[in-house]
Image: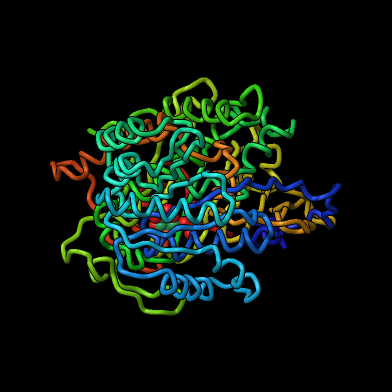
Amino acid sequence: MSLKDDKYRNDPPQTIRIGKIEPTGEPCEEFYPGPAAMIIFGASGDLARRKIMPALFKLTRSKILTENFFIMGMARTEMDSDSFRRMIEAALREAGGFDEAIWERFSKKLYYKTVDYTDIKALEEAGRLIAEKERAHGTNGNRIFYLATPPSVYEGIIESIKASGLSGNGENQARVVIEKPSGRDLESARALDSVVLRNFTEEQVFRIDHYLGKETVQNILMLRFANAIFEPLWNRRYIDHVQITVAETNGIEKRAGYYEQAGVLRDMFQNHILQVLALAAMEPPSIYDPELVRDEKIKVLRALRPVPLNEINNWLVLGQYVEGEVDGRLVPGYREEEGVAKDSEVPTYAAMKLFIDNWRWQDVPFYIRSGKRLNKRFSEVAIQFKSVPHRLFRETLKEDIGPNTLILKIQPEERIQLRFHTKNPGSRVCLRDVFMDFSYTEGYKGLTLGAYERVLLDCMLGDKTLFVRKDGAELSWAFLTPMLDFIESGYAGAPEVNLYRAGSSGPVEADKFITREGRSWRDDG
Ligand code: BG6
């Protein structure tokens, strides 16, 4: 048998457990927010039912939320508080983790008022109801306004909150939570910001990006800056490229109205992916402080090299799913989804190359991609290091040794993996590819918070580290808007939307693109 026959190449990488993880010390102390009323606009909608309410319920179950708290749901849908409670109860049961005793307490904090968002009289009336509940729940006039409506009505709501006096008399500082997308391009984002900042100060505004609330995303900074071993390698000398992937098996669910206006670039790139990229690429701030962290992220966004539109097809691949099988189930193509135009050109997949023009990252490509209805659901940041400079084992092994990769897995599991090579036990010189693997939840007994729970809690605590600042949101739009304009102009040379089968790994054009780059996409191995 030749040496080649038993080389590691044919075997999948093995995983090395890094041993039993003993938590060192007690779980971190949790912070508890003070009294507050949460006023949710769009409370009858999908976002409130699927994300916000389950998160608030879990915070109640975890005993994090103060007793002095209540929720006033507001929306155009005709309903009274009892019907609202029934609707929320059904949503919470569906979300899982329902608990009768907690519901008993939680439901007593739920109210609803039907309003037309621009009807100042109706909002003044709602204000009187809120004031009455504030006395009953002892929330001291602290109000958080959550905009969970379609973005088209954000500006109207902001103006109405102020005009109706809902935002209070200045003694207590109201907070406004704005869900993405804040605008659909640079101009509309600026227009929205100017309305928001005419009525509130930037300090009062919390632009949510729930990706920043995910544990592994937050951990990027801890991993990089609390360890001495990564940062010396975290640059163009040692890193070949970075891949950031958000792959979903879901389609657009019931959100055609929104998605037809957005597409994957606005839905995932402008916010989640660019935010994760900024954390992975930023310089260390002098101290872990919300404003200083955000300053550093912004410098990354400012350094993004504009994609040259005349050769955009070498930088960007778009796709849209057609009928196929996902998780053993036949699913319709995007154009067959309810509410989607039969000839829609909206992309549900994109892969893009980008560069950060600064000292640390010059000429290191970042490949970012996201798509719906793919074969796997996984989100990760993969740092691929350069290959060894000298092929010491070339005679013995014949093949090149693969590069080291550090993978920060965001979901479905939260892990950190380092891929490296070791000698296979035995008499011959042969290598094997292994993963050193760390799971977040292993050995940890304390409370874990989901992304929405984390960001809602931070909003109540007034910690802005995980929220997007005005300049950050605008810089992301400034980067994407020329591309969006070009794509949507239909000009010759604009990228085409390639079709891919639901349940596949994306359009073949994306594979050709990465092959042309001399690289390959990481699979969730
Ligand atoms: C949302 C997007 O912001 O994030 C959705 O609008 C997407 O289209 C979702 O499915 C993904 O979030 P998560 O937490 O499920 O990865």
Tell me residue 242's x, y (percent). 52, 40
Of 286 and 188, the residue lying toward us: 188
Q: Residue furthest bottom?
A: 329
Q: Is residue 371 visible?
A: no
Q: Seen in the image, is 186 located left or right of residue 170?
A: left
Position of 53 relative to 220 (above/below)? below
Q: Nearer the viewer, residue 351 or 116?
A: 116
Image quadrant holding the N terminus, namely bottom right
Q: Residue drawn 46% across and 65% down? A: 50
In the rendered structure, the answer to whether residue 93 lies left or right of residue 14 reads: left
Residue 489, given in percent of the width and then of the height, sits at 15, 42
Residue at 74 percent of width and 52 percent of height? 430
Image quarter for ligand 1: bottom left
> For this view, does 350 lie left or right of residue 82?
left
Q: In the picture provided, is 243 more to the left or to the right than 115? A: right
Instruction: Give the residue at x 28% y 31%.
Output: 308
Between 35 and 447, which is closer to the camera in this rendering?
Answer: 35
**Residue appearing at x 72%, y 34% in the figure:** 226
Can you name the residue that lies furthest to the left here?
Answer: 491
